[in-house]
Image (cartoon, rainbow, N blue to C red):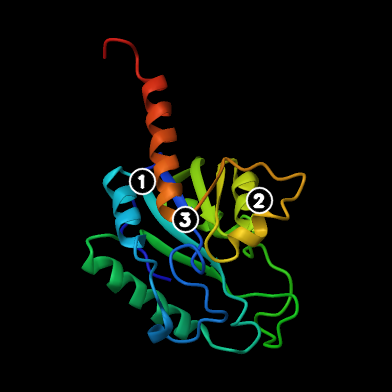
Amino acid sequence: MTTTPTHSAGHPVVFLDRDGTIIDEVGYLDRPERVVLFPYSIAAIGALNRAGFRVVMVTNQSGIARGFFDEARVDAIHDHIAGLLAIGGAHLDAYYYCPHHPDGCVPRYAGRCECRKPARGLVDRAVRELSIDPARSFTVGDRWLDVRLAQNVGGRGILVRTGYGALEEQRRPTDVVVDAIVDNLVGAVGHILSTHGRAVAAATPAGS
């Protein structure tokens, strides 16, 4: 897990899924050289950076529990992603992942936990370490579990059609509340900036 220095409380935050949202979905990603950023990811994340959002990755990595790779490999992948983003002047404020799975074969990681999305454990950790407000959050991902995570923390969820998103859209659960369904991360960021701008305008006293 990589973080930048802690920020003051109250900043709006965008939680981003990793595979199928920021980078290509390639199955169990086990080495940095398999990382392929979507061509728009740097620009989209950079736009959130400039708008004053904290941008935090939250991702389930059950390959650790299944014994496909270890935490050091995931950290190396995230360091590689950070480097690719930095080349374009963008950054994520933190990288959080859940290494657990109930069907895992590695005893340390096997079983149920509080951090596997849509459980809110990763967001709670971000709140503690980054002093952010989940009520002012958006969660973007290609699975309904990402949208459910948003519901669980009192934020807004956006489904992207990249990765598994187009398939997920066809089997929408009846109890899920989604803020928007968009083609990709660019569409999500456009929706976030527009929604946030309207909220700021509504909260600004007339004549200020």
Residue visible at 36% across and 46% down?
Answer: 53
Up the image or down, 38 lies above or below 173; here it is below
Query: Residue 1: x, y in percent?
Result: 43, 71
Which of the marked residues, 1 or 2, is nearer the chain's N terminus? 1
In the rendered structure, which amino acid carries the disc numbered 1?
Phe
Other residues around mark 3 within 10 Å, as few (<14) / some (14–19) / many (≥20): many
166 left or right, relative to 128: right
Quadrant location of the C terminus?
top left
Mark 2 or mark 3, earlier in chain: 2
Quadrant in the rendering for residue 122: bottom right
Write down the residue under mark 1: 53
* Residue identified by numbered label 3: 184
Q: Secondary structure at mark 3?
A: loop
The percent position of residue 180, horizontal first and vertical second, equals 55, 42
Task: Judge whether residue 84 can be spotted in this image.
Answer: yes
Q: Mark 3 belongs to which amino acid? A: Asn
Question: For this view, does 19 lie left or right of residue 38?
Answer: right
Marker disc for residue 148: 2
Q: Is residue 51 above or below residue 118?
A: above
Percent x, y for residue 62?
62, 77
Element type at marker 1?
A: loop
x, y percent for residue 52: 31, 43
Mark with earlier residue (1, 3): 1
Decide if residue 20 is on the left or right side of residue 173.
Answer: left
